[in-house]
Each structure stands twice: as structure tokens, then as C-alpha cells.
Amino acid sequence: METTKKKKMSIICFSGDFDKLVAAFTLATGAAAVNYEVNLFFTFWGLNAVKKKKNRRFTGKGFLARFFGFLMGGLHNVPLSRLNFSGLSPKLMTFLMRKRNVATLPELIQAAILLNVKFYACEMSMHILGLTKNDFIPEIREVLGVAKFLEYSEGGDRIFI
């Protein structure tokens, strides 16, 4: 009997923009729903999608780490990539998504968790930004470097968002 290898998709979430995170999680949940193995690798501003704290705080060791802790306010503070209107646009987009029965960003993240999408955080980005594993949701499976992520994503499609 011939066994079919499961298809794999790995998404590198570099951007912390609302619309780009929606795209990443839409691809991830769609692929997982049709039985792909899906990896999400959060790096730099994309780490905002999986931060525990949902508001802006001066956290971290040292001035710059505290400054980045404030700037990276978590999922509920991510801007739209265009026409952000001082932070109002993500709220308007969420309103429209609900009105049109489209999953919101927090709902897409929960769906990804339920569909066993694997979440990873970039060790180097965390080090630069003064973040620790405790700053993130428990679904982050592992903090890892690029080499390990490339190993995990080998043999599948890689997408950079």
C-alpha cells in the first residue's frame, strides 16, 4: 500500500500589519483545514500576533527593550499596512469582517490553534527586542533560529508575509 506524504506549508510572519496577519492566518487555517502540515514562524513585528499582553507597556530590561515593549503592544495594537487612520482602520476592518461573517484576526488565531497549526518564535528577533518566551501565548511550541525553522519547513512551500 502506497503512503502519501502530507503536504506542508510554512509561513514566515515578518509583518505586524493587521491585513498581512489576516492573510497569513487565512492561508494557515485554509491549508490546515485541507490536511496540510502548517508551520508559522513569527519574527520581528510579526511577533505582535502572538504576544500575551494586549496593550502597550514599558517592559523589558534596559531602555531600548522597554521602548520596544511599548511599541509592540500586541495583537490589539497592530496597524493596517495602508490607510491606518491613526489606528482606527483595524477596528473598522474588524467591524466589517464581523458584519460580513468573515473570521476576525483573533478568531483566525483560535482556529489555527484548533487546527494544530504549529507556532514558532524567532530567537534572534526576541533577543534583539528584549522579549522572552513568557511574553508570548502558550501555543508557541518552540523558540528557534532560522536553521531549525528551515529544517522543520523542509520539503514544503515557504511563504514570506
Image (cartoon, grey):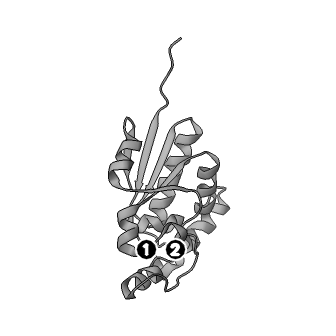
Q: Is there CB contact under 8 Å for labels 1 and 2?
A: yes
Mark 1 = which residue?
Answer: 83
Q: Residue furthest left?
A: 147
Q: Residues within 10 Å of mark 2 (few under 14, many from 20)?
A: some
Q: Look at the picture and state if 113 lies above or below 58.
A: above
* Residue type beneath disc 2: Ser
Q: Nearer the viewer, residue 94 or 126?
A: 126
Is 89 rendered above or below residue 24? below
Question: Of the residues under marks 1 and 2, which one precedes in the sequence?
Answer: 1
Q: Position of residue 61 (x, y in %)?
A: 43, 83
Name the outermost residue toward the bottom.
63
Determine the secondary structure under disc 2.
helix
The spot of residue 101 in percent (x, y) is 67, 56
The image position of residue 116, as x and y in percent, is: 59, 45
Q: Quadrant of residue 75?
A: bottom right
- Residue at (53% x, 78% y) in the render: 88
Q: Amino acid at mark 1?
A: Leu
Locate residue 134, reporting x and y percent.
Answer: 54, 69
Residue displayed at 63% across by 68% down:
95
Q: Which mark is residue 100?
A: none
Q: Residue at x 37, y 43 (%)?
A: 151
Q: Quadrant of the C terminus?
A: bottom left
Left or right, 8 with reference to 52: left
User: Separation of disc 1 and disc 2 at Cα?
Assistant: 7 Å
Question: Is 38 located above or below residue 53 in the figure?
Answer: above
Give me the disc on residue 89.
2
* Tally of marks: 2
Question: Quarter-wise, where is residue 94 in the image?
Answer: bottom right
